[in-house]
Image (cartoon, grey):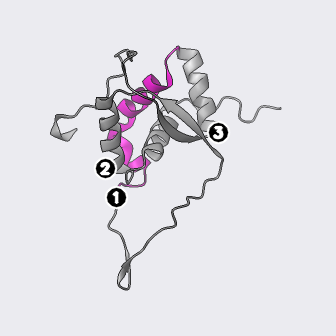
């Protein structure tokens, strides 16, 4: 990455002094995949987010729809989307605990590739990184 900023290393253990919780919003299905992966690997949600960002950082622009585009104009005004996003599935809160330096890296990536939306960045990285939901298609 430019500027000498590295993506958080997934091999490092998150210490008790990592700072406060940060909330990201994930789809219910993606949270289930995250929980299953955490149970299978014994890694925390924070560590898995770091793993996902490390594994996908070269593709983040692609995963998030090509990064920031120039805002189209509508006459005199920049086209302004509604603040409310439409999602196919309900979103739930998931807490991670990055230290300040690692949160700064996440926020830098979110600004660069996801218009500042930390949740969209983390969701895209996790979706590309985590194994697919193994319960899909199974009889209930």
Q: Residue 5: image x %, image y %? A: 21, 34
| Distance in Å between CA atoms under marks 2 and 3 | 26 Å
Who's the residue at 49% across and 17% down the image?
Answer: 43
Viewport quadrant of the C terminus:
top right
| Distance in Å between CA atoms under marks 2 and 1 | 7 Å
Q: Which residue is identified by label 1?
A: 68
Viewport quadrant of the N terminus:
top left
Would you say the magenta stretch is mainly helix, strand or loop? Answer: helix
Direction from residue 139 to residue 117 in the image, left or right: left
Q: Residue furthest right?
A: 140
Assess whether mark 1 and mark 2 are in contact (beta carbons under 8 angstroms).
yes
Q: Residue 40: image x %, image y %? A: 58, 16
Who's the residue at 31% across and 49% down the image?
Answer: 112
Q: Which residue is identified by label 3?
A: 28
Can residue 47 be found in the magenta stretch? Answer: yes
17 and 3: which one is in front? 17
Going from N to C along the chain, the mark reached first, 2 or 3, is 3
**How many marks do you count on the picture?**
3
Write the start and end of the magenta stretch as one range: 42-68
Q: Residue 78: image x %, image y %? A: 37, 75
Q: Residue 102: image x %, image y %? A: 32, 30
Q: Quadrant of residue 19?
A: top left
Can residue 79 be found in the magenta stretch? Answer: no
Q: Secondary structure at mark 2?
A: helix
Q: Quadrant of residue 73?
A: bottom left
Going from N to C along the chain, the mark reached first, 2 or 1, is 1
Dot 1 alpha-carbon crowd within 10 angstroms: few under 14, some 14 to 19, many 20 or more? some
Q: Which residue is identified by label 2?
A: 112
| Distance in Å between CA atoms under marks 1 and 3 | 27 Å
Who's the residue at 32% across and 23% down the image?
Answer: 9
């Amino acid at each position: 990455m430019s500027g000498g900023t590295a993506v958080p290393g997934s091999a490092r253990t998150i210490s008790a002094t990592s700072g406060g919780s940060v909330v990201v919003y994930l789809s219910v299905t993606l949270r289930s995949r995250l929980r299953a992966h955490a149970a299978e690997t014994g890694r925390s949600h924070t560590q898995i987010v770091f793993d996902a960002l490390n594994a996908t950082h070269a593709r983040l622009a692609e995963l998030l729809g090509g990064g920031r585009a120039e805002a189209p104009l509508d006459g005199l005004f920049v086209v302004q989307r509604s603040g409310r996003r439409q999602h196919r599935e309900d979103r739930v809160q998931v807490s991670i605990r990055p230290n300040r330096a690692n949160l700064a890296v996440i926020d830098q990536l979110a600004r660069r590739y996801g218009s500042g939306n930390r949740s969209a960045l983390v969701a895209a990285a996790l979706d590309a990184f985590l194994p697919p939901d193994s319960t899909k298609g199974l009889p209930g």
